[in-house]
Structure formats: structure tokens, C-alpha cells
Image: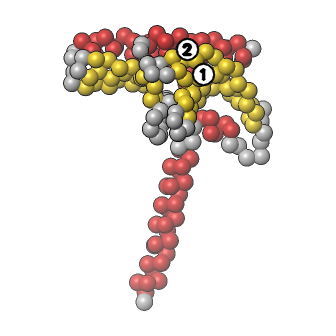
């Protein structure tokens, strides 16, 4: 009888701890865009500025700058949207992350030739933002494939690029446009 009385509080305590861990994981999955646009009790406003399409090996993705006004705060995102047969994949890269992606792209451009020259069976080199956007390349059987991955989860969200110059131009154009909009 005493064991049953002790068992119930222990089970409830463990259950409570597990629920808190699940809540923390859910909070951690929110992107910057989610955090800025899902504040309850505050107005959110979006304003888009279209940019040229990002041309990939197999298609073209729409790009834009999205200004998000949340309460009294302003945030700028570079968005890349790839249309698919069953839906769209969209990357929302916050301005400070965009600056980091541009730096990372410069490193990747230097390393790609060295990595390809090593003739690995398989090698992957990529940079990932906090929100899960990726830019990188892989080398397989002496062939280099450059890519950007728009979303952290799901399928059909990888865009394959002919070269990094196209990506670099698009990202730098986005940076300049955001700087203009910030004035």
C-alpha cells in the first residue's frame, strides 16, 4: 500500500519533466521568422520587395526581401522560394545570418577546388544557419555539385547550382537591397 502511494507522485513528477522537455524542443524548432511573426498581442506587417529569380541547374527560384514589422521592431529577411509539384519550399534568411552566409560562401569557394582535387569517394562541405538554411557542395566520383538547402526539414527543398558565382551575386544583391531599405 505504501509503495502505491509513493509510486503515483514519482510517475507524475517524471511525466511533468518529460512534458517540459517536449515544450523546450518545440520552442527550439522555431525559426527567427516564426519568433518575429508569432508574437501574440502584437501586430505583424510584411512588405515584400521582389528581386531577380535565382537560376539553378533545373529551375529558377523566386527571391525577395521581406520586411517584417513586429510591434515597434523591424526585421529584414532574404527569401528564396522554390515551387514544387506539391508545394513550395522557402528559406527566410535574416539579415545578420545573410552576412554570415556570404562570409561562409567565400570560404567554400576557396575550398571546393582543393576538396575536388583530393578525389574523395564522397566529401560534403556546407555552412548551416541557426534556422537550417544550408549552402555548400559535395564531391562524388570527382564531380562537384553545389547546392543550397532551403528548409531544415522536408524533402524537395534542395536547389542545385551550376556555380557559386550565381549564389554569391544573388546574396550580395540581397544585402545591398536590405541596406537600401534600412535607410
Q: Which residue is mark 2?
A: 170
Q: Residue furthest bottom?
A: 1
Q: Residue 58, position in %: x, y? A: 45, 22
Say which of 68 and 17 sits in front.
68
Say which of 13 and 126 sits in front.
126
Decide: is 42 above or below 115: below
Q: Are marks 1 and 2 in contact (CB under 8 Å)?
A: yes
How would you rate the neighbour count of disc 2 (Cα within 10 Å): few for under 14, some for 14-19, many for 20 or more?
Answer: some
Chain-order first, disc 1 or disc 2: 1
Q: Secondary structure at mark 2?
A: helix
Decide: is 150 above or below 105: below
Q: Residue 98, position in %: x, y? A: 55, 21
Decide: is 42 above or below 138: below
Residue at horizontal 44%, vertical 13%? 164
Decide: is 178 above or below 46: above
Give the numbered dot on residue 140.
none
Q: Residue 144, position in %: x, y? A: 32, 17
Give the numbered dot on residue 63.
1
Q: Is residue 95 visible?
A: no
Which image quadrant is residue 119 in? top left
Residue at horizontal 50%, vertical 30%? 150
Amino acid at each position: 500500500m505504501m509503495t502505491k502511494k509513493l509510486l503515483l507522485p514519482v510517475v507524475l513528477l517524471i511525466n511533468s519533466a518529460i512534458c517540459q522537455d517536449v515544450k523546450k524542443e518545440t520552442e527550439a524548432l522555431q525559426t527567427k521568422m516564426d519568433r518575429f511573426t508569432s508574437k501574440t498581442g502584437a501586430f505583424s506587417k510584411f512588405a515584400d520587395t521582389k528581386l531577380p529569380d535565382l537560376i539553378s541547374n533545373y529551375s529558377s527560384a523566386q527571391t525577395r526581401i521581406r520586411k517584417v514589422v513586429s510591434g515597434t521592431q523591424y526585421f529584414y529577411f532574404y527569401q528564396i522560394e522554390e515551387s514544387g509539384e506539391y508545394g513550395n519550399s522557402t528559406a527566410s534568411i535574416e539579415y545578420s545570418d545573410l552576412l554570415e552566409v556570404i562570409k561562409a560562401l567565400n570560404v567554400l569557394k576557396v575550398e571546393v577546388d582543393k576538396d575536388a582535387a583530393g578525389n574523395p569517394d564522397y566529401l560534403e562541405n556546407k555552412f548551416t544557419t541557426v534556422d537550417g538554411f544550408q549552402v555548400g557542395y559535395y564531391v562524388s566520383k570527382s564531380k562537384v555539385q553545389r547546392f543550397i538547402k532551403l528548409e531544415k526539414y522536408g524533402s524537395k527543398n534542395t536547389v542545385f547550382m551550376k556555380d557559386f558565382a550565381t549564389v554569391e551575386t544573388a546574396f550580395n544583391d540581397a544585402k545591398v537591397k536590405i541596406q537600401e531599405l534600412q535607410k
